[in-house]
Structure formats: C-alpha cells, structure tokens
Image (tube, rainbow, N blue to C red):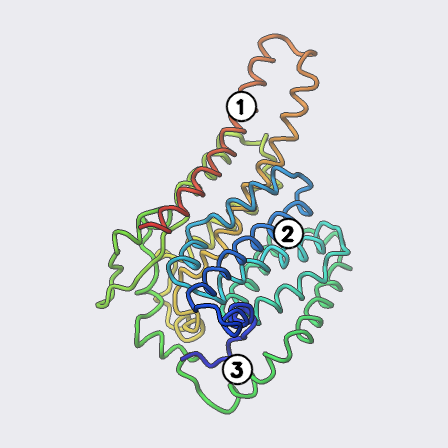
Amino acid sequence: GYGTPLFYGNLAAAFPAALFALGLPLLACWKINAVLVTLLAALSCFACARAMLKDDFAAFLMSVVFVFSGYFAADVLFRATLGEMTSFIFIPAAFLGLHGILRGPKKVWPLLPAALSLILYCHLISALITAFGLLLYALSNAGEFFHRPKKLLLVAASAGLFLLLSAFSILPMLEQLSSASFLATDGSSASTFGTLLERAMPWWSLASDVNIPVNVLIGDSSGSWIPNGLGLAFPLMLFAAVFFGKRAKPRQTLPALVLCTLTLLVCSKLFPWQIGFLQSALGVIQFPWRFLLLAVFFLALYAGEFAAATKTADMGNGIFGNLESSAAQLDSKKKPRAARTVCTLFIIFSLFSFVMTAAP
C-alpha cells in the first residue's frame, strides 16, 4: 500500500527482485538479501569506523554493537523492513562524511550527501531520521565551526550535492504534496491507528531485551507493538563513563553518550509527544521508537570511541610501567584489564540483544 516509487524508493528491493526474476523462491530471495545486507552493514560500519577512530579493534567493536543490535535484528528478522534495514549500510558513511568535515579527513565529505541520498532511495523516513541525527552530531561539534568557519562551505556544498543526487525522488514528491493531501503524510493516519504518544515506549522498556516476548501493551486500545530497547549495553555505557572518568577522554566520548541518551528518550513517553504540533508535524514517522536507529548508532560510536581512548592509555601504561613504583604498576594493570572487560561486555550484551530479538 505504499506510494512506491513516489514516496518510497525501490533501491532496497532491486537485488531481491532480480533474484526473484531469475526464478529463485521468494523466501530464498529474502534470506539471501538479509544475509547480504547484514554483511555489507558490518563491513561498511567497520570501514567507516576505522577511518573515524584510526583503530582496528575500536572499529570492530563499533561494527559489532551497531549490526548486532536488537533493533537491527527486529528490522531483519521480525519486522522485515526492507528499506530501513538496508539503510544500515549507508548510515555510517553519512556520519563519516560529516566527521570528515568536522575533524578530517576532509576528502571524505562527499560521502555525506551520497550516503544520505542512498538512504533516501531506500527509505524516506530513515533519511529524515538520519538527517536529524546528523544535525545533532553537528551541533555537538559546533565549536569546530566557530574555530574554522570555512567548514560551513563544505556543509553547504554537501546540501547542494544532496539535492542534486536526490532530485529524482524529492522533486516529484514535493510536486505531489503541493497539490494534494495524503493521509500518510499529514499525521491523520498515525492518529487513526495510534498517536505518537500512544506508540511511544514506556521508560522502563528503553534498556529491556524482553519487550517483544512479553508483548507489552503501551496504552492504546490495540496494544501497539514495540521493539526491544538498547539492552544491557546502555547501562554499561553509563557505567563506563562514570567509572573511567577522564581516562575515557570525555571530550571525545561524551557527545556520543549524550546523543545516545537523548535519542533514546525521544523513543519514550518521557518525551513530550502530547504537544499538539508534534503529532501533525511528525506523525509521518508513525512510531517514536524509529529513533532507536540513531540511539543504536550513537551507542556503537561511544563503544568504539571508548575502546580507542582506553587502548591508547593502556599502551602507555604497558610501555612505561617499569618507570613507576611497584604499587603504581599494580594499579595501572587494573584499569586496562577493566577497560578490556567493558569492551568484551559490549560485544556480549550486543549479541545477547540480537539473540533475544531474533528468538523471542
């Protein structure tokens, strides 16, 4: 019933459709595509994280937390959302492009408009949510623009290139919206089947891995479905930030923590979804928990940045430990061991979330 390809691009359907045209069974086409998307999302996240963090293990950790998340599992194995799950391939590239503008290397900035355009051709709502996440990331690094205002020129160039690359989708959509009202875009459809407030997640479900099997009723008469939350990896992130303090380089890791927490709260009833204009303006997103897309990415980014920050400190302790007193050496060994434990737990908790969603 979607207005494809007017409002929903067909890019994500191209490969499985080609397999089906070759004569493969429909279910086999879906399974092959799901495996391919998962692999490409993992490789894309690893490559982009490696360019951002300059650390192989940190990139590996970020990729694991991002792809083996409960929300990605829900998209692939539970909701079968072809467009949104394919967007996972391009989201890291979009953030790498913006990261290149903010902190370098500048040569990767074209990834921002290119990746965002590909997300748009996969899934319109995911593109809107990703653009919101990019805005938050830019604001969290606003100081870079004050120090070097010329970076705004690259942002403007990115916006212009995005409009050019996505014109095939955006212009027909704007033409239609200017002359007609669509139930799917004016918020009325969402109000009919459940408002954003009714479909938001309860506060206690944000870090839960059992929302799906419990079949939680969230307040409306139909008992709207909600996905699992971020799982145990979210409180682990908060613990790591407090326990390691300055050693985790908060100037580097704090923005990801704050943005993860903020976007997770937007998924919930703690956010003031009851404000009238939000329903009419944002009803098109249908479900507030779609912002888990951003919460998962920022959680993965924090895990990667934490690994990169603590590994650098660990190397220093290991090389120069013989210059310290024996008591200081003993203390220096505890922190690296604790940091490695936290990184291992990020992997374990992410895999646990994936399994709990895949097999409720």
Q: Amino acid at mark 3?
A: Leu
**Mark 2: amino acid:** Asn
Asked whether the residues under the numbered discs 3 and 2 touch, taking CB atoms below 8 Å apart as contact, a structural biologist would say no
Residue at point 36%, 52% (across, down): 228
Residue 337: image tag: 1
Disc 2/disc 1 C-alpha distance (Å): 31 Å
Residue ID for mark 2: 141
| Left or right: where 27 falls relative to 336 | left
- How many marks are shown on the rendered structure? 3
Q: As rendered, which of 264 and 142 lies closer to the eye?
A: 264
- Badge 3 is on which residue? 6
The residue at the point 45 percent across, 49 percent down is 69
Residue 83 location (% of width, % of height): 50, 67
Mark 1 or 3, nearer chain start: 3
In the shown orientation, is residue 180 left or right of residue 162? left
Task: Please say if 142 is above or below 82.
Answer: above
Q: Residues within 10 Å of mark 3 (few under 14, many from 20)?
A: some
The image position of residue 172, as x and y in percent, is 58, 85
Residue 264 location (% of width, % of height): 43, 53
Numbered tag placed on residue 262 in the rendering: none
Does residue 174 sit above or below 130 in this rendering?
Answer: below
Secondary element under disc 3, as helix, strand or loop, is loop
